[in-house]
Image (cartoon, rainbow, N blue to C red):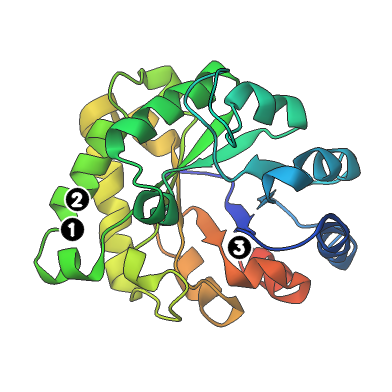
C-alpha cells in the first residue's frame, strides 16, 4: 500500500498585512504545537515572504510563494524570479493556479517554463490543474487534465517529477462554496496518478503527492482526506482562520 505524509497547504492569495500574517501563523503554531505526521505549508503574498520565513524558522510550518517568473532575472517589472523567491526563504512555489490562468493568461506552456524554473532554483512546485464547469459538463475532464499534465511536465525528468506536488482544483469549486463530490475527487486523483504512471512509471506516480483544493473546510476535510488517492489539501479561505486551518490539519490524523 502506498504510504505518504499528507500535506495541508494554505494559499493566502492577496490577503493579510505583515502584522496580520504573523498573528495568523502564531495562532496556527501555538494553537497546534504538535501537528503529527503532516507537512504544513502557508503561501503568503510576496511582500511577507522574508518576514514569514524568518518568523517561522523554528516552526514546523513551511513557506511557499504563490507564483514566480520563468526567468531567473531580467527586465520584467513587477515580477519575482525563482532565485528571488528562494532567497526570500521559500521552499515551495504554487504554479499554474486557476486564477493565474484565468486573470493573467498563463498557458500550459508558460506553466511548463515555471515548473522548470522552480526546479532550477531548488523550489518544490505545487502544480495546480483542474477543469471549468463547462468543460466538466462537456465530458472533457480527462482531456483537460491530460493536456495540463502533458504540457506542464514536458521535458521534466522522472527524478524531478517525483518531488512534484500536484493540486487538483476544479475551477468551479474555488471560492464558490461548492465542493466536488468525494467520488468525483477520487476519480480525478486516480486519473492523475495513472497518467503519471504511464509517463514516469509507478514509483514516480506513487511518490507524487496529490492534493485537493476547492472550498475545503473543517466540515468536509475529513471525508476528502481519507480518499485513497488524496494526499492532502490546498486550502483557500479557511486557511485565513487559524481555528479552521487547525481543524483541517487535524483531519489528516
Q: Which of the pair 136/105 is nearer the observer?
A: 105
**Which residue is situated farthest in the left direction here?**
138
Q: Quadrant of residue 158?
A: top left
Q: Nearer the viewer, mark 1 or mark 3?
A: 1
Q: Seen in the image, is 246 located left or right of residue 112?
A: right
Q: Position of residue 31 (x, y in %)?
A: 86, 68
In primary-sequence order, the first of circles 2 and 3 is 2
Q: Seen in the image, is 103 located left or right of residue 28?
A: left
**Image quadrant containing the C terminus:** bottom right
State the CA–CA distance, disc 1 to disc 3: 27 Å
Residue 69 lies, with reference to residue 177, above or below; the image says above
Q: Residue tagged by mark 2?
A: 144
Dot 2: what SS?
Answer: helix
Residue 25 lies, with reference to residue 154, above or below; the image says below
Residue 252 image label: 3
Q: Position of residue 25 (x, y in %)?
A: 82, 58
Q: Residue tagged by mark 1?
A: 141
Amino acid at each position: 500500500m502506498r504510504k505518504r505524509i499528507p500535506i495541508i497547504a494554505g494559499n493566502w492569495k492577496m490577503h493579510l498585512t505583515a502584522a496580520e500574517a504573523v498573528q495568523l501563523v502564531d495562532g496556527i503554531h501555538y494553537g497546534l504545537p504538535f501537528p503529527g505526521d503532516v507537512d504544513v505549508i502557508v503561501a503568503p503574498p510576496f511582500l511577507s515572504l522574508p518576514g514569514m520565513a524568518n518568523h517561522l524558522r523554528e516552526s514546523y510550518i513551511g513557506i511557499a510563494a504563490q507564483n514566480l517568473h520563468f526567468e531567473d532575472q531580467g527586465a520584467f517589472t513587477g515580477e519575482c524570479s525563482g532565485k528571488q523567491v528562494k532567497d526570500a526563504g521559500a521552499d515551495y512555489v504554487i504554479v499554474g493556479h486557476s486564477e493565474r490562468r484565468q486573470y493573467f493568461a498563463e498557458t500550459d506552456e508558460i506553466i511548463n517554463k515555471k515548473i522548470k524554473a522552480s526546479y532550477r532554483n531548488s523550489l518544490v512546485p505545487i502544480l495546480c490543474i483542474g477543469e471549468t464547469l463547462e468543460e466538466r459538463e462537456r465530458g472533457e475532464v480527462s482531456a483537460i487534465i491530460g493536456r495540463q499534465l502533458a504540457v506542464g511536465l514536458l521535458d521534466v525528468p522522472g527524478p524531478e517529477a517525483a518531488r512534484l506536488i500536484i493540486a487538483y482544483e476544479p475551477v468551479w469549486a474555488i471560492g464558490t462554496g461548492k465542493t466536488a463530490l468525494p467520488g468525483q475527487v477520487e476519480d480525478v486523483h486516480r486519473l492523475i496518478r495513472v497518467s503519471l504512471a504511464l509517463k514516469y512509471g509507478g514509483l514516480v506516480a506513487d511518490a507524487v503527492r496529490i492534493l485537493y483544493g476547492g472550498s475545503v473546510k473543517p466540515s468536509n476535510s475529513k471525508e476528502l482526506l481519507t480518499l485513497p488517492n488524496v494526499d492532502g489539501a490546498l486550502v483557500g479561505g479557511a486557511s485565513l482562520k487559524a481555528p479552521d486551518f487547525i481543524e483541517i490539519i487535524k483531519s489528516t490524523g
